[in-house]
Amino acid sequence: MTKILLIVAFTIAIVLWFKHQSGKRDELPREEKMPEDMVRCVVCKVNLPRSEALLSQGKFYCCDEHRRRGG
Ligand SMILES: [Zn+2]
């Protein structure tokens, strides 16, 4: 009986772990392993989708103010 309880607990733990892992995917990774379409503002170092970033002279910026401020 104890064995069965252990197996059940173990299975639940694995299911919860998988749910935890898949939920993590929505959060942005802090450093390295950035998805290809993520870029970093050279002023404030914030990561943002490439489509939302401003590109100026080969550098990405998060907003127009930072673009004007430059690197
Ligand atoms: Zn910025």
Image (cartoon, grey):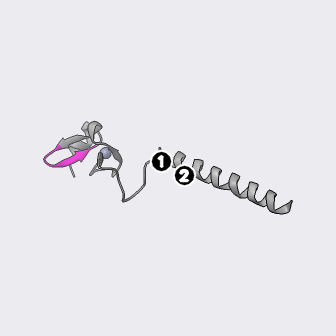
**Residue 20 at what x, y percent from top left?**
58, 50
**Which stretch did the figure color magenta?**
56-61
Q: Residue furthest right?
A: 1
- Judged from the image, the secondary structure of the residue bearing numbered disc 1 is loop
> What residue is drawn where x is 81% and y is 57%?
5
Q: Which residue is mark 2?
A: 21
Q: Position of residue 30 (x, y in %)?
A: 42, 55
- Tell whether label 2 touches label 1 (CB within 8 Å): yes
Residue type at mark 2 is Gln
Between 1 and 27, which is closer to the camera in this rendering? 1
Res. 31 image quadrant: bottom left
Residue drawn at (47%, 47%), measured in percent from left and top?
25
Cβ of mark 1 under 8 Å from ligand 1: the answer is no
- From the viewer's perspective, tell me whether residue 57 is left or right of residue 53: left
Q: Residue at x 59, y 47 (%)?
A: 19
Ligand number 1: quarter of image: top left
Disc number for residue 25: 1
Is residue 60 shown in magenta? yes
Residue 2: horizontal and vertical position, in percent?
85, 62
Quarter of the image containing the N terminus? bottom right
Q: Which residue is located at x 74 percent, y 58 percent?
A: 7
For this rendering, which residue is in front, 66 or 39? Answer: 39
Q: Secondary structure at mark 2?
A: helix
20 to the left or right of 31: right
Q: Which residue reaches farthest left?
A: 57
